[in-house]
Image (cartoon, helix red, strand yellow):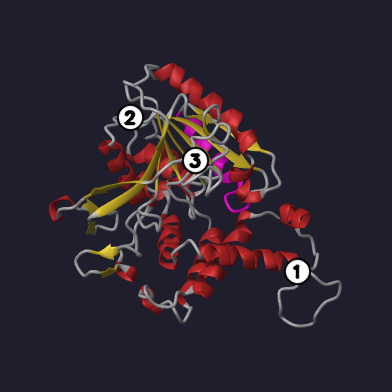
Amino acid sequence: MAKNSVGIVETKYFTFAQKESEYLELDSGRRFGPITIAYEIYGEMNLAKDNVVLICHALSGDAHVAGYYGEVGQKPGWWEDAIGPGKAIDTDKYFVVCSNVIGGCSGTTGPASIDPSTGNHYGSHFPVVTIGDMVKGEEALIRYLGIQKLLAVVGGSMGGMQAIEWALRYPDALLSAVVIASTSRLSPQSIAFDAVGRNAIISDKNWLNGNYYNKELPSNGLSIARMIGHITYLSDQSMHKKFGRRLQSKDQFSYDFSNEFQIESYLDYQGNKFVERFDANTYLYITKAMDYFDVAKVYGEGSLEKALEKVKARMLLLSFTSDWLFPPYQSKEMVDALLKHKKDVTYFNIESSYGHDAFLLEVERESEIIRKFLSATYEKFAGNKRA
């Protein structure tokens, strides 16, 4: 087993809303089911079931947040450096749960899944979902696992949106929330980037109105969407440092339209790699859910301060100085609104040149903050009996 790793893991599945009378009511008003949730668990739940930490993933993430598949070294979890024995989220102390969101493409019901009523892939007939709907699915999983209250909900980027949603939709179901590089609503600029990415997919001749399954995939459109999105995850400083204006393999310009610069080749690689593991329709649905996310509108009649008055959980917010996708001012807005209601909130703006990706790359700097916050919450509110 790799040092301080949870080791070999497997994905589990939970299905609910199987009868029409039990269908999940989505925020759009549509009722939907059945729904299968893919999830992974690490560590042990104590007798009081009060040491549970739920991890929420970002846009391109999945339930595989820690450990390895098959053998150590094969496909590490996307936050492997943060979760495990002795790590920021210590599996010797906490029982950790992570699930793939509704609308995803990594085991949870989404547009690539089979519609039992037709026997075909849902495709574009899949209902539009929200961050709130994703959290409803997570809450159903948590109830299925017999958990009444979570010690913490932790997430970065879109995962942070879910953590905020948990604190508002189910305020009595969690003791704390850790919101990393996230926001209470997307800026017009972020919505614009999402729109361009979706248009790249929809304009691909192979998209076929979302009904491309078992046919040639809209790979070009999805690859371009990923390249656009990936630019927003970086920073000007990190791109200068990693690529500069260096050419890929020549000393002179070729005077054509090939990928000459290293940054071009890098984006091309990222786009092609993404196509191998992600579904184009899922990209459409998840970015739309992020666009719709607006705490002030949904919970505060347009007021962020009024919305966050409903929060009961201890809150930890982390931002990064070079993140221009979800810039620090958006975290500070939430912190200020929470402080006006004298909520228990802690905030750190971490110096980093990595841009939005810092939430995945600055693990060492995040770890000490998260470790202390979770430990303080656990010691103040939870028991310590082991199952």
Q: Residues within 10 Å of mark 2 (few under 14, many from 20)?
A: some
Left or right for 163, reference 75: left
Q: Quadrant of the C terminus?
A: top left
**Is 326 in the magenta?**
yes
Q: Earlier in the sequence, mark 1 or mark 3?
A: 3
Secondary structure mostly seen in magenta is helix
Residue 41 to residue 293: above or below: above
- Where is residue 98 shown, x and y percent of the image? 41, 42
Disc 2 versus disc 3: nearer the observer = 3
Amino acid beneath label 1: Phe
How far, Cα to Cα, is label 1 from label 3?
35 Å
Q: Position of residue 280 (x, y in %)?
A: 45, 67
Disc on res. 67 = 3
For the residues marked 1 and 2, what is the alpha-carbon distance in whole angstroms? 51 Å
- Indicate the amino acid at tag 2: Lys
Identity of the residue drawn at 81% across and 64% down: 246
Drawn side of residue 175 relative to residue 144, left or right = right
- Closer to the eye: label 1 or 3: 3
Q: Which residue is mark 2?
A: 149
In the image shown, does 340 or 387 lie closer to the viewer?
387
Which quadrant holds residue 96?
top left
Q: Nearer the viewer, mark 1 or mark 2?
A: 1
Label 2 – label 3 distance at C-alpha: 25 Å
- Give the residue pinned by disc 1: 261
Of the residues under marks 2 and 3, which one precedes in the sequence?
3
- Secondary structure beneath disc 3? loop
Q: Is residue 135 left or right of residue 304?
A: left
What secondary structure is found at the residue carrying circle 2? loop
Give the magenta range. Answer: 324-341
Q: Are marks 2 and 3 in contact (CB under 8 Å)?
A: no
N-term mark: 1 or 2: 2
